[in-house]
Image (cartoon, helix red, strand yellow):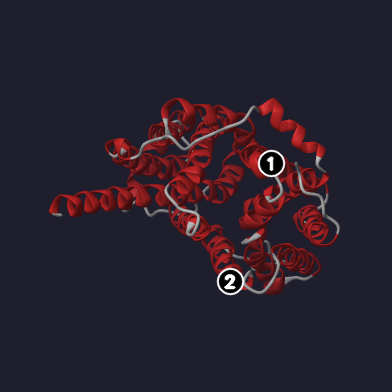
Amino acid sequence: MECSVAIKDNMQEKSGVLDFLSFSMFFLFGGITSLNDVVMPKLKEVFDLNYTQMTTVQFCFFASYFLISIPASHMIKKNGYMRTLVIGLNLIALGCLCFIPATWSARFLVFLLALFVVAAGITIIQVTANPLIISLSNKRNVSSRLTFAHACNSLGTVVAPYLGAMIILRHHPEESFLGKIAAYFSAQNMSEGAIDISICYLIVSVFIFFWSLLTWVNRSKLKDNYFHEGSVLKAIELFRDKHFSFGVAAMFFYIGAEVTIGSLLVNYLILPDTLHLTSEEAGKHLAFYWGGLLCGRLLGIVFLRAIAPSILLAVYGSFAFLLVILSIVSTGSVAGWAMLAVGLCNSVMFPLIFSLTSMDLGHRASEGSGLICMAIVGGAFVPVLTGRFADVTSLNIAFIIPALCYLVVIFFGIYSRYFHHKVFS
Protein backbone atom coordinates (compact mmCIF):
# COMPACT_ATOMS: atom_id res chain seq x y z
CA MET A 1 0.00 0.00 0.00
CA GLU A 2 2.73 2.45 1.05
CA CYS A 3 4.80 1.38 -1.97
CA SER A 4 1.96 2.13 -4.41
CA VAL A 5 1.39 5.54 -2.82
CA ALA A 6 5.12 6.32 -3.10
CA ILE A 7 5.13 5.32 -6.78
CA LYS A 8 2.07 7.49 -7.44
CA ASP A 9 3.67 10.46 -5.67
CA ASN A 10 6.88 9.96 -7.67
CA MET A 11 4.92 9.92 -10.95
CA GLN A 12 3.08 13.11 -9.97
CA GLU A 13 6.39 14.76 -9.10
CA LYS A 14 7.86 13.82 -12.49
CA SER A 15 4.75 15.04 -14.26
CA GLY A 16 4.88 18.33 -12.37
CA VAL A 17 8.50 18.95 -13.33
CA LEU A 18 7.84 18.09 -16.98
CA ASP A 19 4.76 20.33 -17.05
CA PHE A 20 6.78 23.20 -15.62
CA LEU A 21 9.57 22.74 -18.17
CA SER A 22 7.22 22.34 -21.14
CA PHE A 23 5.09 25.41 -20.27
CA SER A 24 8.24 27.44 -19.64
CA MET A 25 9.40 26.73 -23.21
CA PHE A 26 6.41 28.66 -24.55
CA PHE A 27 7.30 31.59 -22.31
CA LEU A 28 10.92 31.50 -23.48
CA PHE A 29 10.43 31.32 -27.23
CA GLY A 30 7.61 33.88 -27.10
CA GLY A 31 9.73 36.33 -25.12
CA ILE A 32 12.88 35.99 -27.20
CA THR A 33 10.96 36.28 -30.48
CA SER A 34 9.26 39.50 -29.34
CA LEU A 35 12.67 41.01 -28.48
CA ASN A 36 13.04 41.59 -32.23
CA ASP A 37 10.53 44.43 -31.93
CA VAL A 38 12.90 46.49 -29.76
CA VAL A 39 16.09 45.33 -31.47
CA MET A 40 14.94 46.45 -34.93
CA PRO A 41 14.55 50.19 -34.20
CA LYS A 42 17.93 50.18 -32.45
CA LEU A 43 19.62 48.50 -35.43
CA LYS A 44 17.91 51.02 -37.70
CA GLU A 45 19.48 53.80 -35.64
CA VAL A 46 22.94 52.21 -35.36
CA PHE A 47 23.34 51.32 -39.04
CA ASP A 48 21.17 54.11 -40.48
CA LEU A 49 18.86 51.62 -42.19
CA ASN A 50 15.73 52.28 -44.20
CA TYR A 51 12.56 50.34 -43.41
CA THR A 52 13.25 47.67 -46.04
CA GLN A 53 16.69 46.97 -44.58
CA MET A 54 15.35 47.03 -41.03
CA THR A 55 12.66 44.44 -41.74
CA THR A 56 15.24 41.98 -43.10
CA VAL A 57 15.68 41.17 -39.40
CA GLN A 58 12.29 39.46 -39.46
CA PHE A 59 13.03 37.89 -42.84
CA CYS A 60 16.14 36.17 -41.47
CA PHE A 61 14.34 35.24 -38.27
CA PHE A 62 11.16 33.73 -39.67
CA ALA A 63 12.84 32.10 -42.66
CA SER A 64 14.17 29.63 -40.09
CA TYR A 65 10.65 28.17 -39.71
CA PHE A 66 10.72 27.18 -43.36
CA LEU A 67 14.28 25.84 -43.27
CA ILE A 68 14.53 24.27 -39.80
CA SER A 69 11.07 22.81 -39.08
CA ILE A 70 11.58 19.52 -40.92
CA PRO A 71 15.13 18.92 -39.56
CA ALA A 72 13.74 19.66 -36.09
CA SER A 73 11.12 16.94 -36.57
CA HIS A 74 13.85 14.44 -37.40
CA MET A 75 15.78 15.52 -34.29
CA ILE A 76 12.76 14.60 -32.17
CA LYS A 77 12.54 11.16 -33.78
CA LYS A 78 16.24 10.55 -33.20
CA ASN A 79 16.81 12.16 -29.79
CA GLY A 80 13.38 12.41 -28.12
CA TYR A 81 11.62 15.49 -26.79
CA MET A 82 13.84 16.44 -23.86
CA ARG A 83 17.18 16.08 -25.60
CA THR A 84 15.84 18.00 -28.60
CA LEU A 85 14.77 20.80 -26.26
CA VAL A 86 18.31 20.91 -24.88
CA ILE A 87 19.70 21.17 -28.42
CA GLY A 88 17.33 24.03 -29.18
CA LEU A 89 18.12 25.86 -25.94
CA ASN A 90 21.88 25.56 -26.46
CA LEU A 91 21.50 26.84 -30.02
CA ILE A 92 19.56 29.87 -28.73
CA ALA A 93 22.26 30.57 -26.14
CA LEU A 94 24.98 30.24 -28.78
CA GLY A 95 23.15 32.66 -31.04
CA CYS A 96 22.83 35.14 -28.17
CA LEU A 97 26.59 34.98 -27.59
CA CYS A 98 27.16 35.61 -31.31
CA PHE A 99 25.97 39.18 -30.74
CA ILE A 100 29.31 39.89 -29.04
CA PRO A 101 31.45 39.27 -32.17
CA ALA A 102 28.70 41.00 -34.18
CA THR A 103 29.26 44.10 -32.06
CA TRP A 104 33.02 43.87 -32.57
CA SER A 105 32.55 43.54 -36.33
CA ALA A 106 30.15 46.52 -36.51
CA ARG A 107 28.47 44.86 -39.53
CA PHE A 108 24.72 44.50 -39.94
CA LEU A 109 25.10 41.18 -41.76
CA VAL A 110 26.80 39.59 -38.73
CA PHE A 111 23.89 40.70 -36.54
CA LEU A 112 21.51 39.01 -38.99
CA LEU A 113 23.53 35.79 -38.81
CA ALA A 114 23.39 35.87 -34.99
CA LEU A 115 19.62 36.37 -35.14
CA PHE A 116 19.26 33.44 -37.55
CA VAL A 117 21.11 31.14 -35.12
CA VAL A 118 18.78 32.28 -32.31
CA ALA A 119 15.77 31.73 -34.59
CA ALA A 120 16.94 28.23 -35.51
CA GLY A 121 17.01 27.29 -31.84
CA ILE A 122 13.56 28.83 -31.28
CA THR A 123 12.16 26.87 -34.24
CA ILE A 124 13.44 23.64 -32.72
CA ILE A 125 11.87 24.55 -29.38
CA GLN A 126 8.52 25.44 -30.95
CA VAL A 127 8.36 22.31 -33.12
CA THR A 128 9.11 20.21 -30.02
CA ALA A 129 7.02 22.00 -27.40
CA ASN A 130 3.57 21.59 -29.01
CA PRO A 131 3.63 17.77 -29.34
CA LEU A 132 5.31 17.56 -25.93
CA ILE A 133 2.32 19.30 -24.32
CA ILE A 134 0.00 16.87 -26.13
CA SER A 135 2.01 13.84 -24.99
CA LEU A 136 1.73 14.98 -21.37
CA SER A 137 -2.04 15.49 -21.66
CA ASN A 138 -5.11 13.31 -22.02
CA LYS A 139 -8.08 13.76 -24.35
CA ARG A 140 -10.12 15.57 -21.71
CA ASN A 141 -7.60 18.29 -20.85
CA VAL A 142 -5.45 18.64 -23.98
CA SER A 143 -7.32 21.73 -25.25
CA SER A 144 -7.15 23.59 -21.94
CA ARG A 145 -3.48 22.72 -21.49
CA LEU A 146 -2.61 23.91 -25.00
CA THR A 147 -4.51 27.13 -24.35
CA PHE A 148 -2.61 27.64 -21.12
CA ALA A 149 0.68 26.94 -22.93
CA HIS A 150 -0.09 29.65 -25.48
CA ALA A 151 -1.06 31.99 -22.65
CA CYS A 152 2.46 31.42 -21.26
CA ASN A 153 3.77 32.33 -24.70
CA SER A 154 1.74 35.55 -24.64
CA LEU A 155 3.07 36.35 -21.17
CA GLY A 156 6.60 36.08 -22.55
CA THR A 157 5.78 38.51 -25.36
CA VAL A 158 4.53 41.02 -22.78
CA VAL A 159 7.46 40.81 -20.36
CA ALA A 160 10.44 40.55 -22.74
CA PRO A 161 9.89 43.71 -24.87
CA TYR A 162 9.34 45.79 -21.72
CA LEU A 163 12.55 44.57 -20.10
CA GLY A 164 14.39 44.66 -23.42
CA ALA A 165 13.41 48.29 -23.96
CA MET A 166 14.90 49.17 -20.56
CA ILE A 167 18.26 47.75 -21.67
CA ILE A 168 18.34 48.38 -25.42
CA LEU A 169 16.39 51.61 -25.91
CA ARG A 170 17.20 53.47 -22.67
CA HIS A 171 20.14 55.83 -22.27
CA HIS A 172 22.25 54.47 -19.39
CA PRO A 173 24.05 57.01 -17.14
CA GLU A 174 27.81 56.47 -17.01
CA GLU A 175 27.71 55.83 -13.25
CA SER A 176 25.29 52.89 -13.66
CA PHE A 177 26.51 49.30 -14.07
CA LEU A 178 25.32 49.01 -17.67
CA GLY A 179 26.64 52.51 -18.36
CA LYS A 180 30.13 51.53 -17.19
CA ILE A 181 30.11 48.44 -19.41
CA ALA A 182 28.93 50.49 -22.39
CA ALA A 183 31.55 53.18 -21.70
CA TYR A 184 34.34 50.59 -21.59
CA PHE A 185 33.41 49.05 -24.93
CA SER A 186 32.68 52.44 -26.47
CA ALA A 187 36.32 53.25 -25.80
CA GLN A 188 37.13 50.34 -28.15
CA ASN A 189 35.38 52.25 -30.97
CA MET A 190 32.19 50.18 -30.78
CA SER A 191 28.70 51.62 -31.17
CA GLU A 192 26.92 52.20 -27.86
CA GLY A 193 23.64 51.04 -29.42
CA ALA A 194 25.18 47.76 -30.59
CA ILE A 195 26.71 47.28 -27.14
CA ASP A 196 23.27 47.61 -25.52
CA ILE A 197 21.95 44.86 -27.80
CA SER A 198 24.90 42.60 -26.93
CA ILE A 199 24.43 43.16 -23.19
CA CYS A 200 20.74 42.25 -23.46
CA TYR A 201 21.42 39.02 -25.33
CA LEU A 202 24.32 38.14 -23.03
CA ILE A 203 21.89 38.24 -20.11
CA VAL A 204 19.44 36.09 -22.10
CA SER A 205 22.19 33.56 -22.92
CA VAL A 206 23.04 33.06 -19.23
CA PHE A 207 19.38 32.45 -18.42
CA ILE A 208 18.97 30.03 -21.37
CA PHE A 209 22.11 28.07 -20.44
CA PHE A 210 20.68 27.60 -16.95
CA TRP A 211 17.36 26.40 -18.40
CA SER A 212 19.21 24.02 -20.72
CA LEU A 213 21.01 22.50 -17.74
CA LEU A 214 17.72 22.14 -15.84
CA THR A 215 16.13 20.41 -18.84
CA TRP A 216 19.13 18.08 -19.27
CA VAL A 217 19.00 17.02 -15.62
CA ASN A 218 15.34 16.01 -16.09
CA ARG A 219 15.77 14.43 -19.54
CA SER A 220 15.10 10.87 -18.34
CA LYS A 221 11.73 11.67 -16.73
CA LEU A 222 9.87 11.26 -20.04
CA LYS A 223 9.66 8.20 -22.22
CA ASP A 224 9.76 9.53 -25.79
CA ASN A 225 7.41 7.12 -27.52
CA TYR A 226 4.69 9.48 -28.72
CA PHE A 227 6.01 11.30 -31.76
CA HIS A 228 4.95 10.28 -35.24
CA GLU A 229 5.59 12.01 -38.54
CA GLY A 230 4.50 11.15 -42.05
CA SER A 231 6.41 11.62 -45.28
CA VAL A 232 6.90 15.25 -46.27
CA LEU A 233 6.43 14.48 -49.97
CA LYS A 234 3.24 12.57 -49.25
CA ALA A 235 1.97 15.42 -47.06
CA ILE A 236 2.23 17.89 -49.95
CA GLU A 237 -0.73 16.21 -51.65
CA LEU A 238 -2.91 17.69 -48.91
CA PHE A 239 -2.77 20.91 -50.90
CA ARG A 240 -5.24 19.33 -53.34
CA ASP A 241 -7.88 20.11 -50.72
CA LYS A 242 -9.02 23.73 -51.26
CA HIS A 243 -9.96 24.28 -47.64
CA PHE A 244 -6.57 23.11 -46.41
CA SER A 245 -4.75 25.29 -48.96
CA PHE A 246 -6.88 28.29 -47.99
CA GLY A 247 -6.09 27.66 -44.31
CA VAL A 248 -2.34 27.53 -44.93
CA ALA A 249 -2.61 30.79 -46.88
CA ALA A 250 -4.60 32.37 -44.03
CA MET A 251 -1.89 31.33 -41.55
CA PHE A 252 0.81 32.79 -43.84
CA PHE A 253 -0.91 36.18 -44.07
CA TYR A 254 -1.99 36.29 -40.41
CA ILE A 255 1.56 35.70 -39.15
CA GLY A 256 2.81 38.23 -41.69
CA ALA A 257 0.37 40.88 -40.43
CA GLU A 258 1.03 40.22 -36.74
CA VAL A 259 4.82 40.28 -37.10
CA THR A 260 4.75 43.35 -39.37
CA ILE A 261 2.73 45.46 -36.94
CA GLY A 262 4.80 44.35 -33.95
CA SER A 263 8.04 45.04 -35.83
CA LEU A 264 7.12 48.59 -36.88
CA LEU A 265 5.20 49.72 -33.80
CA VAL A 266 8.14 51.39 -32.06
CA ASN A 267 8.95 53.43 -35.16
CA TYR A 268 5.24 54.20 -35.60
CA LEU A 269 4.61 55.34 -32.03
CA ILE A 270 7.53 57.79 -32.01
CA LEU A 271 6.11 59.68 -35.00
CA PRO A 272 4.74 63.19 -34.26
CA ASP A 273 1.49 62.18 -35.99
CA THR A 274 0.84 59.36 -33.51
CA LEU A 275 1.84 59.22 -29.81
CA HIS A 276 5.20 61.05 -30.29
CA LEU A 277 6.94 58.89 -27.66
CA THR A 278 10.63 58.38 -26.99
CA SER A 279 12.14 55.11 -28.22
CA GLU A 280 12.18 53.65 -24.70
CA GLU A 281 8.57 54.65 -24.02
CA ALA A 282 7.47 53.24 -27.38
CA GLY A 283 9.29 49.99 -26.63
CA LYS A 284 7.49 49.68 -23.31
CA HIS A 285 4.16 50.28 -25.06
CA LEU A 286 4.71 47.02 -26.94
CA ALA A 287 3.50 45.38 -23.73
CA PHE A 288 0.01 46.67 -24.59
CA TYR A 289 0.17 45.13 -28.08
CA TRP A 290 1.40 41.73 -26.93
CA GLY A 291 -0.62 41.93 -23.73
CA GLY A 292 -3.69 42.20 -25.92
CA LEU A 293 -2.92 38.72 -27.22
CA LEU A 294 -2.96 37.37 -23.67
CA CYS A 295 -6.24 39.07 -22.75
CA GLY A 296 -7.90 38.30 -26.08
CA ARG A 297 -6.95 34.65 -25.81
CA LEU A 298 -8.65 34.37 -22.42
CA LEU A 299 -11.74 36.15 -23.76
CA GLY A 300 -11.73 33.85 -26.78
CA ILE A 301 -12.07 30.80 -24.54
CA VAL A 302 -15.27 32.30 -23.13
CA PHE A 303 -16.63 33.35 -26.54
CA LEU A 304 -16.04 29.90 -28.03
CA ARG A 305 -18.67 28.49 -25.69
CA ALA A 306 -21.34 30.39 -27.62
CA ILE A 307 -19.80 31.29 -31.00
CA ALA A 308 -18.58 28.94 -33.74
CA PRO A 309 -14.78 29.11 -34.27
CA SER A 310 -15.16 30.14 -37.93
CA ILE A 311 -17.48 33.04 -37.05
CA LEU A 312 -15.25 34.15 -34.18
CA LEU A 313 -12.25 34.15 -36.54
CA ALA A 314 -14.12 36.31 -39.06
CA VAL A 315 -15.23 38.72 -36.31
CA TYR A 316 -11.74 39.08 -34.81
CA GLY A 317 -10.28 39.50 -38.30
CA SER A 318 -12.83 42.20 -39.13
CA PHE A 319 -12.01 44.19 -36.01
CA ALA A 320 -8.27 43.89 -36.75
CA PHE A 321 -8.83 45.19 -40.30
CA LEU A 322 -10.99 48.10 -39.10
CA LEU A 323 -8.52 49.09 -36.36
CA VAL A 324 -5.61 49.22 -38.82
CA ILE A 325 -7.66 51.32 -41.25
CA LEU A 326 -8.73 53.61 -38.39
CA SER A 327 -5.09 54.10 -37.43
CA ILE A 328 -4.12 54.89 -41.03
CA VAL A 329 -6.81 57.56 -41.54
CA SER A 330 -6.46 59.20 -38.09
CA THR A 331 -3.72 60.93 -36.11
CA GLY A 332 -2.59 61.40 -32.53
CA SER A 333 -3.63 59.08 -29.73
CA VAL A 334 -6.42 57.52 -31.82
CA ALA A 335 -3.90 56.38 -34.45
CA GLY A 336 -1.45 55.03 -31.87
CA TRP A 337 -3.89 53.22 -29.62
CA ALA A 338 -5.91 51.81 -32.52
CA MET A 339 -2.77 50.08 -33.79
CA LEU A 340 -1.89 48.83 -30.30
CA ALA A 341 -5.42 47.42 -29.94
CA VAL A 342 -4.87 45.16 -32.95
CA GLY A 343 -2.99 42.84 -30.60
CA LEU A 344 -6.28 42.04 -28.86
CA CYS A 345 -7.77 40.90 -32.18
CA ASN A 346 -4.70 38.82 -33.10
CA SER A 347 -5.06 36.70 -29.98
CA VAL A 348 -7.22 33.79 -31.15
CA MET A 349 -6.26 33.80 -34.83
CA PHE A 350 -3.39 31.30 -34.64
CA PRO A 351 -5.27 28.54 -32.75
CA LEU A 352 -8.50 29.10 -34.72
CA ILE A 353 -6.81 29.02 -38.14
CA PHE A 354 -4.78 25.99 -37.07
CA SER A 355 -7.80 24.03 -35.82
CA LEU A 356 -10.10 24.99 -38.73
CA THR A 357 -7.45 24.04 -41.28
CA SER A 358 -6.69 20.64 -39.78
CA MET A 359 -10.15 19.63 -38.51
CA ASP A 360 -11.00 17.43 -41.54
CA LEU A 361 -7.61 15.75 -41.99
CA GLY A 362 -8.37 12.75 -39.80
CA HIS A 363 -5.38 10.41 -39.52
CA ARG A 364 -3.34 12.82 -41.67
CA ALA A 365 -3.53 15.64 -39.14
CA SER A 366 0.12 15.25 -38.10
CA GLU A 367 1.27 15.67 -41.71
CA GLY A 368 -0.88 18.75 -42.19
CA SER A 369 0.34 20.29 -38.94
CA GLY A 370 3.90 20.43 -40.23
CA LEU A 371 2.81 22.22 -43.40
CA ILE A 372 0.68 24.69 -41.44
CA CYS A 373 3.63 25.53 -39.17
CA MET A 374 5.83 26.16 -42.20
CA ALA A 375 3.37 28.92 -43.18
CA ILE A 376 4.83 30.91 -40.29
CA VAL A 377 7.38 31.96 -42.92
CA GLY A 378 4.83 34.69 -43.69
CA GLY A 379 6.57 36.56 -40.89
CA ALA A 380 9.63 36.72 -43.14
CA PHE A 381 8.06 38.15 -46.30
CA VAL A 382 5.22 40.50 -45.32
CA PRO A 383 7.35 42.78 -43.06
CA VAL A 384 9.94 43.27 -45.82
CA LEU A 385 7.22 44.07 -48.36
CA THR A 386 5.66 46.56 -45.92
CA GLY A 387 9.06 48.10 -45.18
CA ARG A 388 9.71 48.59 -48.88
CA PHE A 389 6.30 50.21 -49.32
CA ALA A 390 7.04 52.50 -46.33
CA ASP A 391 10.28 53.64 -47.98
CA VAL A 392 8.52 54.71 -51.17
CA THR A 393 5.42 56.17 -49.44
CA SER A 394 5.21 56.56 -45.65
CA LEU A 395 5.07 54.26 -42.65
CA ASN A 396 1.46 55.24 -42.01
CA ILE A 397 0.28 54.31 -45.51
CA ALA A 398 2.38 51.12 -45.58
CA PHE A 399 0.16 49.55 -42.91
CA ILE A 400 -2.40 48.98 -45.66
CA ILE A 401 -0.46 45.78 -46.45
CA PRO A 402 -1.14 44.05 -43.08
CA ALA A 403 -4.73 45.36 -43.34
CA LEU A 404 -5.11 43.45 -46.63
CA CYS A 405 -3.64 40.36 -44.95
CA TYR A 406 -6.47 40.41 -42.43
CA LEU A 407 -8.96 40.28 -45.32
CA VAL A 408 -7.61 36.82 -46.19
CA VAL A 409 -8.22 35.74 -42.58
CA ILE A 410 -11.79 37.10 -42.68
CA PHE A 411 -12.63 35.31 -45.93
CA PHE A 412 -11.15 32.05 -44.61
CA GLY A 413 -13.44 32.24 -41.57
CA ILE A 414 -16.48 32.89 -43.78
CA TYR A 415 -15.47 30.12 -46.19
CA SER A 416 -15.03 27.65 -43.33
CA ARG A 417 -18.49 28.46 -42.02
CA TYR A 418 -20.68 28.72 -45.09
CA PHE A 419 -18.96 27.19 -48.11
CA HIS A 420 -16.77 24.33 -46.90
CA HIS A 421 -18.54 20.98 -46.65
CA LYS A 422 -15.91 18.53 -47.86
CA VAL A 423 -14.30 16.10 -45.44
CA PHE A 424 -10.78 15.12 -46.45
CA SER A 425 -10.27 11.43 -46.93
Q: Nearer the viewer, residue 248 or 159?
A: 248
Cβ atoms at labels 1 and 2 below 8 Å apart: no
Q: Residues within 10 Å of mark 1 (few under 14, many from 20)?
A: many
**Disc 1 to disc 2, how far (Cα)?**
26 Å
Across and down, in percent, residue 390 comes to 77, 49
Is residue 49 something that shows in the picture? no
The quadrant of the image that shows the N terminus is bottom left
Is residue 24 something that shows in the picture? yes
Across and down, in percent, residue 395 comes to 75, 54
231 w.r.t. 153: above or below: above
**Residue matched to label 2:** 299
Q: Nearer the viewer, residue 283 or 361?
A: 361
Residue 72 numbered tag: none
Across and down, in percent, residue 420 comes to 82, 54
Q: Nearer the viewer, residue 246 or 335?
A: 246
Q: Amino acid type of disc 1?
A: Ala
Element type where label 1 sits in the image:
helix
**How many numbered circles are shown?**
2
182 w.r.t. 262: above or below: above
Please identify the residue farthest to the right as the structure is shown. 419
Residue 375 numbered tag: 1
- Looking at the image, residue 167 sits to the left or right of residue 60; the answer is left
Across and down, in percent, residue 362 comes to 67, 45
Please identify the residue farthest to the left as the structure is shown. 2
At 63% from the left and 61% from the top, the residue drawn is 348
At 62% from the left and 44% from the top, the residue drawn is 44
